[in-house]
Amino acid sequence: MTTVKPAPATPAGRKPAPPSASAKPPRPGRRNRDWVHGLLMSAPALVGLIAFVGIPFVYAVVLSFYNVRLGSPLAPHFFGIEQYRRLFTDPDMSGPFLRSLLNNLTFAVVVVPVQTGLALGLAILLNRKLTAIGLFRSLFFLPVVFPIALVAVIWRLILARSDDGLLNSALQAVSFGNWGAIDWLGDGLTAMACIIVLSIWQGVGFQMVILLAGLQQIPGELYEAAELDRASRWQQFRHVTLPGIHGTLVFVAMLTSVLSFRVFDQVYVLVKGGGLDEDAARTVMYQAVTTAFDQNNIGQASAITVVFFLIVVALTLIQRRAVRTGNED
């Protein structure tokens, strides 16, 4: 009778023998199919991005090198970099452009931290298990659903210069008639502040919802462990909440930055509706639109758009680099 010898045991500390050559490696064809499937699933978004963003931007770059005017019987002729030179050297063009760029930077510097911080505070407040919490969440999100034209009309009534304006009336009631009527939209000192307040009120609910979703992904066990360690509310916020939503917070800040630089609707509606100081609240996008359709200068408007796009891309890359450096530290 043949005796089968047991396999020798592997000595301690030695690596097990590699698998035999008969073991089949992953099939490369499957990886290729996954790549193709991913491309097919993203194809509708890519097609829309190319059709509605890529092609129009390339066309705008081409138009910026031509003298193109709406309604002109003359054919467009090549201008080279003349539109860009005028944008920085011609006082009639460089003055309004630099003022618009300064207004955009001021708007973004104030709105990005204030709106992000306010959205985080509201998200933490609404992340509690309270009665009718869904109703409160809907109320804070409601301004996002309103069309910007309706929002601008409502705020124009609130900030009206006459005594019938809601804000002036409220201040007069509080001061027992000692508060004089202020032209909030027409005053250069308060025009941009009014646009900032309007934009924060209208958009903070969107960032709040994103941050609320991030807060709900933090495991509750982390807070329980922090309570067992007798961590205070501030310590829990600093060492549990902020690290848990760091990626979401960075995304919200960058999204708010992009939206802040492309602010246009509220300025356009308030200016065309009357009352808003155009120079004090002018933005780059507003100048590009008015240059194209009020002055019929499509080439100059395209140059403004291209320069502003490059500025926004540069600022976004700097912001991403700063965030990445902070994470490494």
Image (cartoon, rainbow, N blue to C red):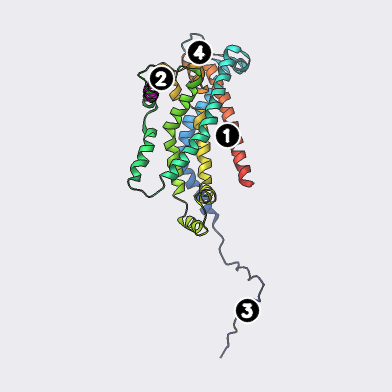
Q: 324 and 174: which one is in front?
A: 174
Tell me which label, 4 or 3, sits earlier in the chain: 3
**Residue topped by disc 2:** 178
Image coords of residue 299 (percent x, y): 54, 17
Does residue 112 belong to the magenta stretch? no
Residue type at numbered disc 2:
Asn
Distance between the Cα atoms at labels 1 and 4? Answer: 32 Å
Residue type at numbered disc 4:
Arg
Q: Any mark on residue 316, and which? A: 1
Residue type at numbered disc 3:
Ala
- Which region of the structure is painted magenta? 166-179
Which quarter of the image is occupied by the N terminus?
bottom right
**Residue topped by disc 4:** 69
Tell me which label, 1 or 2, sits earlier in the chain: 2
Q: 301 and 199: which one is in front?
A: 199
Q: Residue at x 45, y 28 (%)?
A: 197
Residue type at numbered disc 1:
Thr
Distance between the Cα atoms at labels 4 and 3? Answer: 87 Å
Label 1 sits on a secondary structure element that is helix
Front of the two marks 1 and 4: 1
Measured along the vertical axis of the image, is residue 259 above or below residue 217?
above
